[in-house]
Image (spheres, rainbow, N blue to C red):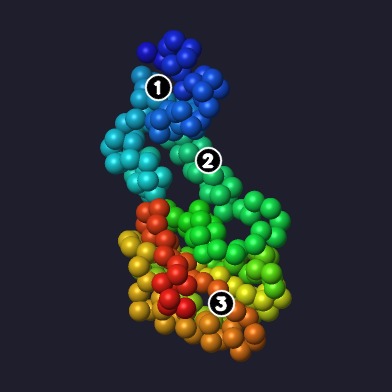
């Protein structure tokens, strides 16, 4: 049966209008994003099948294109709709709520980096550049790597901090393959960056590490900074 033949209040779009998005299941929200299924497969059935076969929402959204496109009914249009929606959500969560938002708590930076870095299949090293009152000037993605790591160069971080006239920075990167626990290499590069930035009177307030799930570790909270 096509979704159009279902009772109106059982259709995902109508349920969203009537009840709001928070009342919809993962499958229903996914069906709204996909828009259409294929011949003999409605969008909700396709969404539920994708969630079931890929093991849930997180592995579905992290899956490589070739894994998703092998599922009948998805196609490039559905894939593009899905990942455009994901990217809009990521940018919304990563954007400051107000201009010059103050990063006064490690939790603020943790939430920011989680939204920006979670789900990536490669390592990405970013810096939040802050003014003298710890208000966000901008965030830059400085170094990109493979699944196992990214090379970080203190000289480039110092150059960008001086370019933005930053008084402080918060460092952040992800561990796409696992735990957010800081490695010896993470602690070593944090020390090098702190020393290099200290030479030009720029403080390192924290280094946030985001794991493959919805978790992060603050080196400042761990007393490792």
Q: Position of residue 7 (x, y in %)?
A: 44, 10
Of the numbered discs 1 and 3, the one sitting upstream in the chain is: 1
Q: Which mark is residue 42?
A: 1
Residue 28 visible in the picture: yes
Query: Is the residue 151 above or below the residue 31 in the image?
Result: below
Determine whether the residue tagged by mark 3 lies in a helix, strand or loop.
strand
Decide: few, some or many residues near mark 2? Use Cα within 10 Å; few <14, some 14-19, many ≥20: few
**Alpha-carbon span between mark 2 and mark 1:** 19 Å
Q: Position of residue 16 (x, y in %)?
A: 52, 25
Q: Nearer the viewer, residue 167 or 89?
A: 167
Identify the residue at image location x=67%, y=65%.
Answer: 135
Identify the residue at image location x=35%, y=46%.
Answer: 59
Q: Which mark is residue 223?
A: none
Determine whether the residue tagged by mark 1 lies in a helix, strand or loop.
loop
Dividing the picture into quadrants, the one containing residue 181 is: bottom left
**Alpha-carbon span between mark 2 and mark 3:** 34 Å
Residue 80 visible in the picture: no
Query: Is the residue 108 above or below the residue 131 in the image?
Result: above
Identify the residue at image location x=37%, y=54%.
Answer: 213
Identify the residue at image location x=71%, y=76%.
Answer: 165
Where is mark 3, residue-wise? 204
Q: Position of residue 117 (x, y in %)?
A: 48, 58
Query: Is the residue 76 above or below the residue 183 in the image?
Result: above
The reply to whether discs 2 and 3 touch (Cβ–Cβ < 8 Å) is no
Where is mark 2, residue-wise? 85
Decide: few, some or many residues near mark 1? Use Cα within 10 Å; few <14, some 14-19, many ≥20: some
Of the numbered discs 2 and 3, the one sitting upstream in the chain is: 2
Dividing the picture into quadrants, the one containing residue 146 is: bottom left
Q: Position of residue 21 (x, y in %)?
A: 51, 30
């Amino acid at each position: 049966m096509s979704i159009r033949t279902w009772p109106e209040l059982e259709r995902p779009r109508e349920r969203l209008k009537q009840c709001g998005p928070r009342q919809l299941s993962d499958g229903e929200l996914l069906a709204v994003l996909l828009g259409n299924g294929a011949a003999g497969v409605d969008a909700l059935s396709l969404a539920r099948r994708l969630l079931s076969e890929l093991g849930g929402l997180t592995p579905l959204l992290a899956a490589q294109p070739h894994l998703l496109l092998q599922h009948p009914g998805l196609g490039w249009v559905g894939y593009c709709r899905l990942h455009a929606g994901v990217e809009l959500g990521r940018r919304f969560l990563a954007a400051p709520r107000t201009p010059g938002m103050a990063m006064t708590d490690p939790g603020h930076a943790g939430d920011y980096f989680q939204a920006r870095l979670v789900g990536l299949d490669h390592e990405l090293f970013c810096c939040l550049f802050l003014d003298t009152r710890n208000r966000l000037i901008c965030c830059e993605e400085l170094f990109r790597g493979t699944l196992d790591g990214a090379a970080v160069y203190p000289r480039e971080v110092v150059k960008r901090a001086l370019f933005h006239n930053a008084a402080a920075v918060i460092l952040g990167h992800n561990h796409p393959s696992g735990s957010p626990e800081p490695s010896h290499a993470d602690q070593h590069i944090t020390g090098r960056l702190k020393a290099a930035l200290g030479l030009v009177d720029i403080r390192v307030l924290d280094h946030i590490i985001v794991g493959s799930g919805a978790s992060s570790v603050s080196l400042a909270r761990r007393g490792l900074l």
